Each structure stands twice: as structure tokens, then as C-alpha cells.
Amino acid sequence: MAEIHEIATLTSKGQVTVPKSVRQLLGLGTGGKIAFDVRAGEVVVSRVDTPHEDPAIGAFLSLLEADIRAGRNLHALPQDLADVLLANASHPVDFDDDIEGEVSL
């Protein structure tokens, strides 16, 4: 990893802006987490990898869990779909293959 020496100023509230070159090197964006470790009088700053938590997905999973616990809205897969899924379960996938047909994102 590249070495960078930057100086930042501590505000009256104890805040500091992480210099842009350091943010870029650590791959930090808005909302990114950093850790401060003090070792032998030096401060080591490192990126903290935290799982992304999407509130919409969290809410959906909570609803799904409630339905599962209550036994609501649960149905078996149609047999033909289950058969296709099982037949392709061990089918190798190359994620670098081109996608055929039109795709809209």
C-alpha cells in the first residue's frame, strides 16, 4: 500500500477531516467507518469493513420472517419450477459470459 503523510487540524469539537488522499487510498466514502488504534504513542487509522444494511431489505426480511413464523403466505414451488431448479443446481456459471438478449437495469 502506498505511503502518505498528511496533516489535518483538530477542531474545537475534537473533529478532524480525513484528507482526500487518505480517503481514496482506504476506499472510504460518505458513511464509511474508520478505526483508531493507538500503538506506542502513534495513531493508526484503518478502514472498518461493515456489512451494508439496506433498511428496505431489512423491513422485507422482517415481514418475511413474520409470515414464516405465522405460517402465512407460504406455498410450495410448482413442481416444474422445482425440477428445473434441481436440474440446474450443479450447472457451472461463468459470470464473464456475455448476456444474450436485451437487459434493462
Image (cartoon, helix red, strand yellow):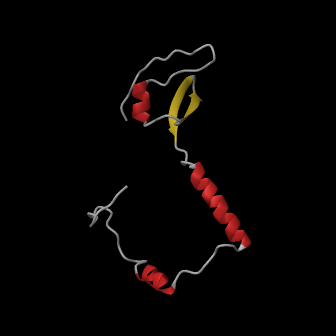
- Relative vertical location of residue 11 with respect to residue 87 in this rendering, above or below: above
Which residue shows up at 34% across the image and 69% down it? 93
- State the image coordinates of residue 104 (x, y, percent, origin top left): 35, 57
In-front residue for pair 60/5: 60
- Relative vertical location of residue 13 with respect to residue 39 in this rendering, above or below: above
- State the image coordinates of residue 7 (x, y, percent, origin top left): 46, 17
Question: Does residue 63 appear to the left or right of 16 in the view shown?
Answer: right
- Relative vertical location of residue 69 with respect to residue 36 in this rendering, above or below: below
Quarter of the image with the N terminus is top left
Q: Picture quarter containing residue 76?
A: bottom right
In-front residue for pair 94/54: 54
Question: Does residue 46 appear to the left or right of 102 in the view shown?
Answer: right
In-front residue for pair 35/77: 77
Which residue shows up at 43% across the image and 82% down it? 84
- State the image coordinates of residue 37 (x, y, percent, origin top left): 58, 31
- State the image coordinates of residue 91 (x, y, percent, origin top left): 37, 76
- Relative vertical location of residue 79 with respect to residue 71 in this rendering, above or below: below
Number of numbered discs visible in the structure rendering:
0
Question: Does residue 4 appear to the left or right of 39 in the view shown?
Answer: left
Which residue shows up at 67% across the image and 64% down it? 65
